[in-house]
Amino acid sequence: MSVSIKEVAAAAGVSVGTVSNVLNRPEKVAAGTVERVTAAIDSLGFVRNDAARQLRAGRSRSIGLVVLDAANPFFADVARGAEDRAAEAGMVVLLGNSDEAGEREDAYLDLFLEQRVNGVLITPAGDDIPKLERLRAAGVPVVLVDHDARGSALASVTVDDIEGGHLAVAHLLAQGRRRVVFVGGSPSIRQVADRLDGARRAVQEVSGATLETLEVSALTVLQGRAAGEQIVAMDAADRPDAVFAANDLLAVGLLQAFALMSDIRVPHDIALIGYDDIDFASATVVPLSSIRQPASAIGRTAVELLLREIDGADGGERTIRYRPELVVRTSSTV
């Protein structure tokens, strides 16, 4: 059984209030008394019920973070950046993986409300921003992560994915490629839609260039491999000469399909570029060209904005947009 604060008080020969002060405001207690209470705590093995204390105070030291795919190294890096900044502020991050599903996202938001988190960071699975605005109106600060607020009252940290999509396909076209396929998930995912928008703009700028889309059910290696199998199954004359994958996991799956199931050579037959520039993009069998996002900085900045929201600070940027960077490796250049 757990040791109660009353037992600590009895062992130290002080009141319950004095023990509480030692735990929460030790500067108000005489040094000798602090030593007696601390000795009693150590002797009895007392562990404070921090959750109960937080509930009484109406707040906690935690921040909720919901991402689209916790298995994606990009979101792992975002979470790491958020954790590092939260730790500096004496807070912790509770991570939820929506798996691109609105129902799971709602379940995590409900859980975070029950836990009385100080605020929520979220990469939404869709565009139901009013739901998140209602959360903010209820007194829970919210910051969008890797998602543009676009006219809403919410603070956000994002990357210009339209520019990123344009950079990726403009690079492929500059290599002389003209038949481009975009492999991505549902356009209801804002990042996918924006990257496709940028790709279309790049194609419109080059005479004779075409762009087709191949939609997959998830932004994963397995779905990338499935998309690659579809391309392999095409007649050679109908295949694209370039592929832009909506993220690096899809690109890795495409590489696997081309290498293991056909004689398609990357980049000689098909040039390939991904998105995110995750750590092992440079370590694939054919080093992967990609569009780099500053994942860790996105996480840190999101917590910074959330802390400002929590403190009710006025002024300062509420929408932070990073610019993507083209990283060229072997997969897109002969």
Image (spheres, helix red, strand yellow):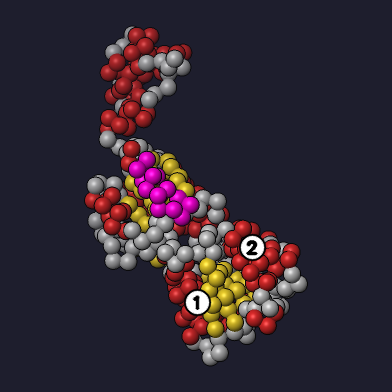
Left or right relative to 139: residue 183 = right
Q: Magenta stretch?
A: 98-112
Q: Main secondary structure of the magenta part?
A: helix
Report x, y in % for residue 256: 69, 63
- Residue at image coords 42%, 64%: 188
In front of the other: 257 or 31: 257
Q: Tell me which amino acid carries mark 2.
A: Arg
Residue identifier under label 1: 199
Residue 298 to residue 235: above or below: above
Image point (64%, 81%), residue name: 238
N-terminal label among 1 and 2: 1
Report which quarter residue 112 is drawn in: top left
Residue 41 image position (x, y, % from top left):
42, 17
Q: Nearer the viewer, mark 1 or mark 2?
A: 2
Name the foreground residue: 94 vs 7: 94
- Residue 225 is labelled as 2
Residue 103, magenta (yes or no): yes
Q: Secondary structure at mark 2?
A: helix
* Image quadrant in which you'd find residue 275: bottom right
